[in-house]
Image: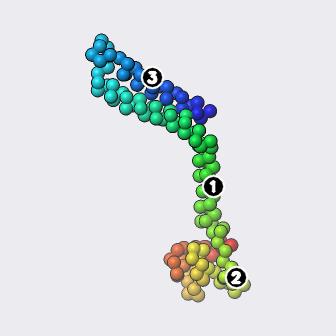
Amino acid sequence: MQRLIGIVPLGIGLTVITFLWSQPFGGFHSPPLFFRVFGSFVALSFVLTGGGLLFGSMANSNGLLGMLHEARRRQRELEAELRGDDFSDSSVDRQSGGYACTACGAPLTSHADVSPHGDVKCGHCGRWFNIHRQV
């Protein structure tokens, strides 16, 4: 279906270019040279758009749907990275109450100020993290 949409602008562009340049120069009701050149550039954008829609989907069979799935996959990866799902902090002893930075893995110092919501700034890398959201 997507390929069929490309036929319309391709046909419009080719029709305009054919009309502009098939008329005799200096004839009655023939377009001046300026309008032929300007109209050709406008029609060329239609031809390129239509050709891109028509033949671009042949090279990549997924087309726009594949790009949408790729964008969703990347979004899920970034959300998982922000949540810290892929971070494993096995080096920190949880039984002793030690916490580690989700970005660099440095242990939380004993004099660190922790907000009531659990937000704390890492003394090593300077990034903020929440001690309640650790895996």
- Drawn side of residue 45 relative to residue 135, left or right: left
The label shown at residue 94 is: 2
Residue sitting nearer the eye, 111 or 124: 124
Q: Residue at x 49, y 29 (%)?
A: 10
Front residue of this view, candidates 39 and 110: 39
* Amino acid on which disc 2 is placed: Arg
Neighbour tally class for label 3: few under 14, some 14-19, many 20 plus, Cα within 10 Å: few
Q: Quadrant of residue 94?
A: bottom right
Q: Is residue 115 visible?
A: no
Say which of 122 and 63 sits in front: 63
Residue at image location 58% in from the left, 41% down from the top? 59
Q: Amino acid at mark 3?
A: Thr
Query: Eyeballing the image, is 128 above or below 74?
Result: below
Q: Are marks 1 and 2 in contact (CB under 8 Å)?
A: no
Return the mark for residue 73: 1
Q: Quadrant of the C terminus?
A: bottom right
Q: Secondary structure at mark 1?
A: helix
Describe the element under mark 2 as helix, strand or loop. Answer: loop
Residue underneath mark 3: 15
Question: Given this view, does label 2 or label 3 mark the residue nearer the observer?
Answer: 3
Q: Which mark is residue 56?
A: none
N-term mark: 2 or 3: 3
Give x and y (percent) for residue 9: 49, 29
Q: Secondary structure at mark 3?
A: helix
Residue 105 position within the rendered picture, expressed as x and y whole percent measured from the top left: 60, 78
Check the image and report above or below for 115 versus 31: below
- Marks 1/2: CA–CA distance: 32 Å
